[in-house]
Amino acid sequence: MAILKRFGDIMRSNINALLDKAEDPAKMVDQMLLDLNEDLAAVKKETAGVMAAATNARKQVDDCKADIAKYEAAAKAAVKAGQDDDARKLLATKQQFESTLPSLEEAAKAAEDNATKMRQMHDKLVNDINGLQARRAAVHAKVSVAKAQQQVNKATDATASTTRSMAAFDRMEAKADQMLGEANAMADLNSQGDKEDLANKYLAGGSASVEDELAKLKAEVGVEEQQ
């Protein structure tokens, strides 16, 4: 039966689809379980149909056996009543049912085998889904932890970036301090040069007073100024 072959591919097809589209495992697991439950509904309906067919086939066997027993009993009664012609007709009908019985039994056996296989696969699918339902919580928990770890990693990266920025800021601040120090030092040097120039200016102007003092001294000692 086609359903028996298709059923065997249900788990593989869903798992392959999960692997092909695996992005968020939690969402994929939820989708997989949704697909499997839809498949289970279809399998349950088809299993019920196969089991009903097996029951019907077995009933046909039982009905055929009942007819054989009935016509045999009727033939016996006809013989007892001295009605051999009726007995022959009844026995002929009985033989017709007897010839049909083996094919009915063979069909019933095949139907019952199919029903057993379908029921086994149905039960396996139910167990697999129940197992996946139990594992679903673990998958969601792992995904949640993984996402939290990713956030921690991002925060760690941001902290490292901030640390690097702070170090760069410190270097720039130190460089600014150095530039300011050099500028102040240069200003001090320039200011010192101006003071020396100013002192020299007045010292040069003071040489006139020295000349005056020399002339005064000569006058005191009676030395005349040379013209």
Image: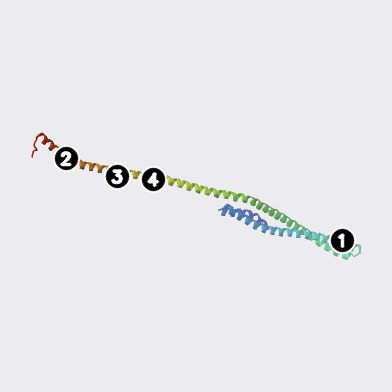
Task: Examine the rendering and report whether any part of residue 205 can be seen.
Answer: yes
Q: Earlier in the sequence, mark 4 or mark 3?
A: 4
For marks 1 and 4, give the CA distance.
118 Å
For marks 4 and 3, give the CA distance.
21 Å
Which residue is identified by label 2? 209
Identify which residue, 140 or 4, lies in the foreground: 140
Report which quarter residue 180 is drawn in: top left
Which residue is identified by label 3? 187
Q: Earlier in the sequence, mark 1 or mark 3?
A: 1
Mark 3 or 2, closer to the camera: 2
Which residue is identified by label 4? 173
Crowdedness of circle 1 by 10 Å Cα count: few (<14), some, many (20+)?
Answer: some
Q: Residue at x 73, y 59 (%)?
A: 52
Identify which residue, 37 or 190, lies in the foreground: 190
Mark 3–mark 2 CB contact (< 8 Å): no
For marks 1 and 3, give the CA distance.
139 Å
The kind of secondary structure element at disc 3 is: helix
Mark 1–mark 2 CB contact (< 8 Å): no
| Amino acid at the residue labelled 1 | Ala
Q: Earlier in the sequence, mark 3 or mark 2?
A: 3
Report which quarter residue 198 is drawn in: top left
Q: Position of residue 85 (x, y in %)?
A: 88, 65
